[in-house]
Image (cartoon, coloured by chain):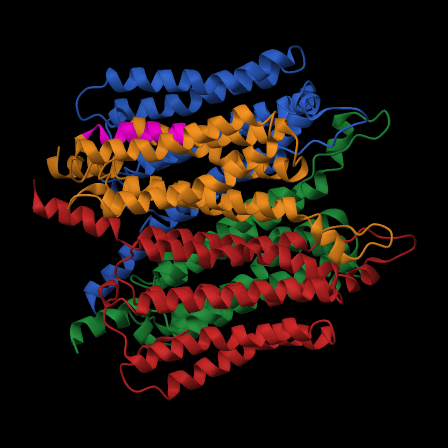
Chain colours: A red, B orange, C blue, D green
Amino acid sequence: MDDDRRNERYERTHDPSRVLAFSDGVCAIIITLLVIEIHVPALGNGESLRDAMRELRPSLIAFLISFVVVAIAWMGHRDLFAMVRRTDRGLVWLNILYLLPLCLVPFGASLIASFWNDPVALRLYGFLLVAVAVTRFWIWVYATGRPHLLVVPIDPRSRRLGIAVALGPGATYALAVVIAPSSPTASLLIYGGVPVVYFIAITIARSSAPAGAAERDFT
Amino acid sequence: MDDDRRNERYERTHDPSRVLAFSDGVCAIIITLLVIEIHVPALGNGESLRDAMRELRPSLIAFLISFVVVAIAWMGHRDLFAMVRRTDRGLVWLNILYLLPLCLVPFGASLIASFWNDPVALRLYGFLLVAVAVTRFWIWVYATGRPHLLVVPIDPRSRRLGIAVALGPGATYALAVVIAPSSPTASLLIYGGVPVVYFIAITIARSSAPAGAAERDFT
Amino acid sequence: MDDDRRNERYERTHDPSRVLAFSDGVCAIIITLLVIEIHVPALGNGESLRDAMRELRPSLIAFLISFVVVAIAWMGHRDLFAMVRRTDRGLVWLNILYLLPLCLVPFGASLIASFWNDPVALRLYGFLLVAVAVTRFWIWVYATGRPHLLVVPIDPRSRRLGIAVALGPGATYALAVVIAPSSPTASLLIYGGVPVVYFIAITIARSSAPAGAAERDFT
Amino acid sequence: MDDDRRNERYERTHDPSRVLAFSDGVCAIIITLLVIEIHVPALGNGESLRDAMRELRPSLIAFLISFVVVAIAWMGHRDLFAMVRRTDRGLVWLNILYLLPLCLVPFGASLIASFWNDPVALRLYGFLLVAVAVTRFWIWVYATGRPHLLVVPIDPRSRRLGIAVALGPGATYALAVVIAPSSPTASLLIYGGVPVVYFIAITIARSSAPAGAAERDFT
């Protein structure tokens, strides 16, 4: 049998391109589906559209927070797979696992849009965000720990930083879940504030990284 | 006329890339649309959100089972097309046929979410899963039986194994359809349990495969 | 200024790849959105799910017909663009125009699902199918008439055949629109039957084509 | 450490391909989701489907205007990124920002479909269109001002023209927002008319451009 062709089959089977196409598709759909949960208001008796729009505020805030969450999840995925040359079975399954809580984000968003101050809604949304962070941590550790899957081996410092930018938000979201019953507003502020801190933390990590370190290209 | 260019047209016409893009898109959308069927509960008189969330359990189970079904269908598609170098007319049409029952899975999922214990709902969902298995069998047999479409010819043992991982789940789902009227719970357990058995079976097949066999790279 | 780089920009600007990605995405979403129009039945007083499922029959037929319509529109797009090496402004706009009636197909499908026997619904659905056929004719004539956009110039016979497989169904759908008020059932039968005739016609065209003719690779 | 491989990682991290795949996906989904907002009419007492269809006219107009808005936004994105060889962090984030108002267009469309003559609805829709124009201006200025991101540096004249085709429509939409309370119809006419003027303006810009100027390839 032809060794070159077997080799070609091996590379094709481990080629990440369809994993990327599928993940890009899923993220693009989630981020676009979020808008479906913003319902055109039905006007009550004598109510003007301007009044009704005010009631949409929770929906819009849930939309915005979720939009940024999904965008960051996609960017983190892109940052990781920019370093990945080959996939293996574990990585394909972990990738599906990473997409699972993300796919539930539109439901979580419409839940907090409807039950703005209800700790149960806020906790469930927080659980989803924790799950996104944990699966991001898992897939990062899995891929960066297997040099044969990578374009170039990652240095330990950059690897730890990648863990930190996954688990840091995850721990903060977990805190928000814990405090949701006593102070729902604080919990919501955390959901809105973590992406801002995340953005600043990456900015600092990039500028303080040594030349050639992977985190210089974190998004 | 230019032979090189005609050749280029031939290769472009038989190039699988758009079939993959289309199939990745369809699978990504199905897996993301599943969440639309989980409706934010409307609270009854004096009902708390916590109580209402309990009624969502059927929706969540239907979501999870369907999520895994679609993920496995996509992985099987990826495993097959990693070996496919060229498409032909039959393969393009069979690919559409493979996507047909998958596209109906969100409807089946919302049906069992609403009619949890109703054998009619469970049977219809089971029929869809049987149809996914049968079309997977068909497209596998079609493509692997045409060496000019493949990167490298597949050995008979690997080919039979590919048939087994399509028809095995199919037969089990058919059993679930048959027993649905007498024991709906058993039927549902089968829908949830088959992916687990599937995962284990592939793990065993991979580790017991001779070097270079196609099933070493099954996902 | 660097001529090579300008050349690269020229080729990138005329590269069809994003037009294909966008069109694959749109077709994949339309074909998957069709399922949203099949609503889980709400059971009436004393009604069983089995009875209620019977009322779903119009929805399922509308789903199936529309599924095949979109699949064929995608295949026709793929057949055409397999011959296209470069796009230009006209082709990009015509491509958007081709997607416009397709994007309305899910609405047309849910209209005939709800108003099964109403000529108004059947006519509107037919108008959409005529529009798909006319825009397919237009984009085919535009692209095949511009040899600098093609991988290899198309022979006049194949070009005429491509026109026939667009306008033939179009004319038949127009007939269905005309007869809808007097015989809605015949009109519906035409919507369901045209894809079958289309499939057979392409099969004949392929087998009777001279070696190297473009229609040998029509899907 | 291997310099070639580090270089490969650098290029992969700055490769625009996933940004394009994600953006194509988002635009394709938005343009297809618009149809969901056209609801199958529920017939009132003694009302015929023909009468009910008349009430759909606002929905169809909102659909058509939004369809063209999204199509033009996608074409402008394609025109820009045809010149972009590499992305950087700023460009990836600006791209997300560009998609944000676009993702809200389906909501805006269903708002003006329901509240046809209400200045509040017309203003909100106009705000979205202004936001699309402003983010388009921003991403254009950002990318074209960084020659290391481009295939070939852009000449100042073409760059100014790119700014004009973003800000021109933006200013006109802003005018429509201002006049909405006094003359809602004029405001709506502007939303429908801007794409026509845009198309003509690009046609003139292309034909009067010097050889090799970027605007010769504007879509």
Q: Which residues are magenta?
A: B133-146
Residue A187 located left or right of residue C31: right
Q: Can you say whether A202 is above or below C18 in the image? A: below
Quadrant holding the C terminus of chain A: bottom left
Task: Give the residue at x 32% y 22%.
Answer: C161
Task: Give the residue at x 16% y 75%.
Answer: D2
Which residue sits furthest bottom? A208
Quadrant holding the N terminus of chain A: top left
Q: Can you say whether C110 is above or below A45 in the image? A: above
Residue C52, quarter of picture: top right
Q: Position of residue A121 (x, y in %)?
A: 70, 62
Res B93 visible: yes
How many marks the image carries: the answer is: 0
Residue C160 located left or right of residue A201: left
Residue A46, quarter of picture: bottom right
Task: Give the residue at x 30% y 55%.
Answer: A16
Residue C210, quarter of picture: top left
Q: Can you say whether C85 is above or below A157 in the image? A: above
Near-viewer residue (B162 or C21): B162
Q: Position of residue C99 (x, y in %)?
A: 49, 40
Near-viewer residue (B103 or B141): B141
Res D196 visible: no
User: For the stretch drawn in magenta, what is the main secondary structure?
Assistant: helix
Q: Can you say whether A9 is above or below B7 in the image? A: below
Residue D37 located left or right of residue B76: right
Task: Give the residue at x 86% y 58%.
Answer: A48
Is B142 in the magenta? yes
Q: Position of residue A12 (x, y in %)?
A: 23, 49
